[in-house]
Image: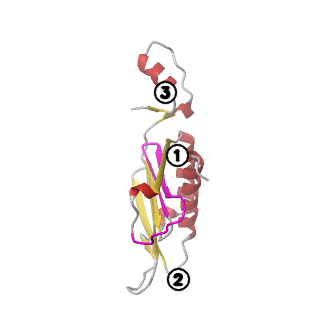
Amino acid sequence: MLQFTDAVTKRAFQSRRHLIILNPSQIIIPSEFEAYYFHTTESSYEEVSIKNGRITYTYFKGVKVNSSNGWNQNELTKKDTLLSNADVDSLRKFVAKTGFMKLDTVVGNPASTDKYYTFVLMFNIDGKKRTVHFNSIPGGALMPDAFRKSRDALMMLARKRTGVY
């Protein structure tokens, strides 16, 4: 099923009364591409997902006064929008070039007494899925370059397309 980025084109296509020449940037063709990123600390929250050509960005905007574990939904801002084929293809190609799909599934091995933060990043590219958990430990392993570059590209796309800077 085709998804359209604007209502006028969608209505015209559904009415089948008009000859329509579609601009490729106006349609989203479902592909096997998904992405997911999650990271939270006592004072921050970021979650991004791409599925079926739609990007959703959930984040905490402001200062967390109560540093209790967990967030409730009314403290978070959620924005989403459709992506163009060009956006999806560009991100897909970039991630493939970084070597992300070859990373170990867990990077950083914290001891039970270590304070650490976990970053989760997942890409499903043409049926090949890779989820990597990076555990950031003071004095521990550095974030792999492929992880950082892929995460940064996903975050930049999320912020740009949802209007969050």
Q: Which residues are magenta?
A: 45-69
Q: Is residue 74 above or below residue 112?
A: above
Residue at the (54%, 85%) spot, across then down: 139
Instruction: Give left or right: position of 90 versus 77.
Output: right
Asked if residue 65 lies in the magenta stretch, the reply is yes
Q: Is residue 113 above or below residue 153?
A: below
**Label 3's element?**
helix
The three-letter amino acid code for the residue at tag 2 is Pro
Residue 117 percent location from the top left of the image: 46, 74
Gap in angstroms between the C-alphas marked 1 and 3: 21 Å
Q: Which quadrant of the rendered structure holds the N terminus?
A: top left
Asked if residue 72 lies in the magenta stretch, the reply is no
Give the residue number, with chain letter if any, for mark 2: 138
Frontmost of labels 1 and 3 is 3
Tally of marks: 3
Give the residue number, with chain letter if any, for mark 3: 7
Gap in angstroms between the C-alphas marked 3 and 2: 50 Å
Give the residue number, with chain letter if any, for mark 1: 88
Q: Is residue 52 above or below residue 48?
A: above
**Label 2's element?**
loop
The three-letter amino acid code for the residue at tag 3 is Ala
Gap in angstroms between the C-alphas marked 2 and 1: 34 Å
